[in-house]
Structure formats: C-alpha cells, structure tokens
Image (cartoon, rainbow, N blue to C red):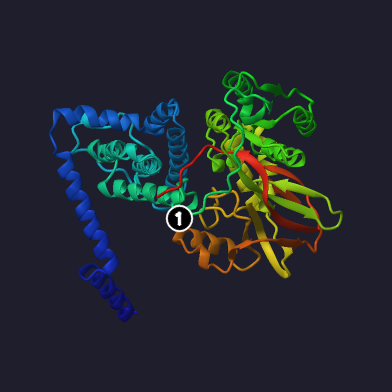
Amino acid sequence: MARTLISGLLRRWAAVVVPSPERQVIRALRKWDAAMFRRIAGVRSPVLAIALPAVSRAADRSLLWLAISGVLMASRRRSVHRAARRGLVTLTVAGTLNDALAKRALPRRRPLRVLIPIGRRTRRRPTSGSFPSGHAASAAAFAVAVGLAKPALAAPLAGLAAAVAYSRVYTGANHPSDVLAGTAVGVSVAATANRLAPLRTPDRVRTVEPRSDPQPPRPYGEGVVAVVNPRSGGGRGAQLAEEVGRLLPRAEVVTLTLGDDLVQTLRGAAERAEVLAVGGGDGSVNAAAGVAIETGLPLLVLPGGTFNHFAADLGVAGPADAVRALASGSAIRADVGTITDADTGSERLFVNTASLGSYPHFVAARERWESRLGKRLAAVLAVVAVLRSERPLRAVVNGREFLLAMVFIGNGRYQPHGFAPGWRPRLDDGILDVRLVQTGRRLAALRLVLSLATGRLGRSHLYAETGSVGLSVSLPDGPTTLAWDGEIGPGSARLRFRPRHWAMTVYRPDVRPFP
C-alpha cells in the first residue's frame, strides 16, 4: 500500500518537474499569450483608443461585413455582386463552424481585463467562449472570399479584417491566440469554398473557335419575335420585356400570361419569325432550343433567369450583349444533348446538364420551400434533407453496375474538373461530360469530403469523370426522377444520352480568342 502511494507521488512529482512535450508546448503558448496581451495592453495611442473600439463594436454580429456587402450589392457590376454573395456565404459558414463547433469543443475563459484601460474595454462583455475568436473568423472569411472574387478589394478588406482581429485583443475581448485561431478558421473556410466552387475564369487553353454561322445584321430587331417569361428570375422577366422593346424597336415582343403554354407560344411565334428570341431562364431556353431546331430558325437568348448558365457560357451577360450579336449577325453552331427513353423512343433535349440520383431530389425539395423561404435558404434546407434521406441508386452505366449518389451528364465538357462543374469553354465540342459519384461503401461520405478538401478527388475510387459520345443508363430497381436544365420530371428504367453536334444556330457576341 505504502509502495503504491509512494510510486503515485513520484509520478506526479515527475509530471510537474519534467512535463510531457504536450504540456511544454501548452506552457510556452500560454507564456507567449500572456506576453503579447501585456504588450498590446500597454500600447498608448489616442487615435487607436478611439478607432479600434469602434471597429470592434461595428463587427459585432457581423454587422460591419453585412453593411459592406450591401454597398457592394448596390454596384451595377455583376462581378462585384458575385463577390458580395460569396463573401456572405463564406461568412455564414465560418461563423457557424466557429461558434457552434469550435467554441463548444474548446471552451476557454475570456482574458482578465485589469491591464486594459477602462475607456478601451468592450461595453458588452461576451458570454461565449474566447477560443477561437468569432470576430476574427468572420473577418478573415469575408475578406478572403471577396478578395479572391474581386482582387481590387483584397487589400482594403484585408486591412480592415486585420484591424478587427487586433481590436479584439486591444479591447480585452480575446487572447492573442484566440484571434490567430479564428483567423485560421476563416481563411480555411474561404480557401475550401474557393476549391469546391472555383471562380469562373477564361479558359486560356482553348485554341479552336466554334463553327461560325453568320446571319444578316438586324440592328433594330427586324424579323425578330421574342417570347418573354415575366415570372423568370423571381419576376425580373417583366423588366426584361420592357428592355427588349426599347433595345429592339422593330421586334415583336410576346409576354407570357398566366396559363399560357410556353412551347405552344414559341411555336406560334416561330411561324411568323425570321429569328426566334426567348427571354427567361435555362428552362425557357431549353424549350426555345427545341422549337428553333424544329423550325430551323436561329435562336437569340435574352437572359432573364436566376442563373442563366447557357447564356453565360455563350458570352451573353445581358440583353445588350444579345442585341450586339444580333446587330452584327454574329452567330455560331451549338450542340444540344438528347435524352431518349429506350422503352418508348420519346426524346427530350438539354442545353446544359442532365442528372440522376440526389440532385433531382435536391431540386424538388428546394422548390417546395423556396416560395416561403426564398431560394437560398430553401437550398440549404434541401441539402440537409437530401443528405439525411439519400439512398444509393443502383445503375448499370454502359454495361457496368454501380451504387451511385449522382450521375451528372453535361452537354459539352465542363470546367473545373471535380465535384462542382461550373462552366464550359465551348458549346460545340460534340462530347458529353459524364461524372459519377459512388456511394454505398464504408465511410463513403467521409472519404468524399476528405478527397474534396485535399484536392485529391480525381484519385478517389468513389469518383469517375470522362468524356463520352454516348451513355446508356439502366436502372434495375425501376425508374427514378430525372433532372435536366433545372427542370425535374419522371425518368425511365432505360435511358440513352447522346450529343447532337451543331444542332442549332444561336447568336453569340464576337469573342476574340486568347493569344
């Protein structure tokens, strides 16, 4: 008994006298933390004493970053809007991870403020844990995300984020290590978001221009009949109809009314048109592409939807770009993808993408909620719902059987490679972009997340990507939901996907190739 007691005392004494490497590191960090806190507390500057507490208060609840994003959204430049949206999304993710996970997993008391002059202290002492700093995480996430999307804003936002981080120690709200850890969280979230959803950039490896199909110049819209969906883009289509009428005074503009059938209206417009134009989102473009191919008319795309993927890949950012192409007669031949029901022989087209598996369910869930919650919040809830209820899809793809989470088919090769295809450098390469995400294996979701985070998705056995001139998909367990160009509908147990090369003529502004 005495021997056991003595040995226990010796072990405790040894742990105190010769601490473990981990304890040595923790002690060193605490000494550094205390020394840096004392040094910053001793800074005496009338300017900083006024500015930094104000900056710290402005960043409470991310109000500073929300205000900046509001200013950016007031700009007329789409690139600035995109930067603001990316900043807000990254800010939200970083704040949630930091406050809901990191702070709870690593609780730490706030620093004692006896060394901080009373006039510099935060008026409201936070009740949450000190580590990591939420203010620093949000500041770093917003500044990095916006800076990557809009490099001209990187320097001023980085300086402001650094001021917010420093102000948390200066006012006694956080330890220096809290601020460093929070900054690391924010930068990591922004970098991961940029990897998963890279920014749209020009593809400088393209050397072959699309097949040109010049048309007669129509600067005032002579012979153009435009069908505009006023409900597209959350109601922005109504403004689009007015803008088209102003830009093309000699064109006929047909505005859909409640109850009108889009395809029948397009077919009626095509009977009296020399150029068929459509104003709306990708679903409207899909319908117009089918009618344009049936009638042999060139198609003018007037973007008025939420995402306008086809118009963006075409180089048409707005109605003015489309009118410029019409006025010069600049047009190209573009591909469409076809989906054939192998049992009935019926066919449908897609101009952007088609998919099976989890994505159609995501679209269905989002559409159920977006009228009440808005598209962005509905999309977040839809992702959570799909991940909770996802079941593997048993599919035979070109003769090989898989358990899949998703089958993605793109009309043309998409960039970037990986799990988040975003754009196409060409619309006429005659290739389907096929991407498969497998599931049903042990720890499949975790393995996919790790592959994404480390940039090794292309080497994962759960992911496959290839170009194909044809794809057959059989579903042994019966039909499932099919998505194409943002629309969803019933699929079939046997489907064939094919590219239809140079199927239609579509107006595109003259874009010079990169040198």
For the point 73% across and 44% down, the residue is 488
Amino acid at dot 1:
Val
Q: Quadrant of the N terminus?
A: bottom left
Residue 92 position, x and y percent, is 46, 40
Query: Measuring 54% from the left and 64% from the top, which residue is drawn there?
Result: 447
Which of the 4 image quarters holds residue 290? top right
Mark 1 crowd level (few <14, some 14–19, many ≥20, 10 Å Cα): few
Give the labeled residue for mark 1. 205
Instruction: Report if residue 360 is visible in the image.
Output: yes
The answer to whether one can see residue 393 in this image is no
Is residue 402 depicted above or below 169 in this figure?
A: below
Q: Is residue 510 above or below residue 254?
A: below
Specify the farthest residue to the bottom.
Answer: 3
Count the numbered circles shown: 1
* Element at label 1: loop
Residue 255 lies in quadrant: top right
Q: Position of residue 253 (x, y in %)?
A: 68, 22
Of all residues, the one furthest to the front in this rendering is: 216
Which residue lies at the image location 51% right of the left edge and 63% below the top edge? Answer: 457
Q: Is residue 49 left or right of residue 278?
A: left
Q: Is residue 443 above or below residue 115?
A: below
Q: Position of residue 442 (x, y in %)?
A: 61, 68
- Judging depth in this view, the residue of 316 and 188 nearest the camera is 316
Most foreground residue, 342 or 183: 342
Q: Position of residue 65 (x, y in %)?
A: 39, 33
Q: Is residue 185 left or right of residue 308?
A: left
Name the quadrant containing residue 145: top left
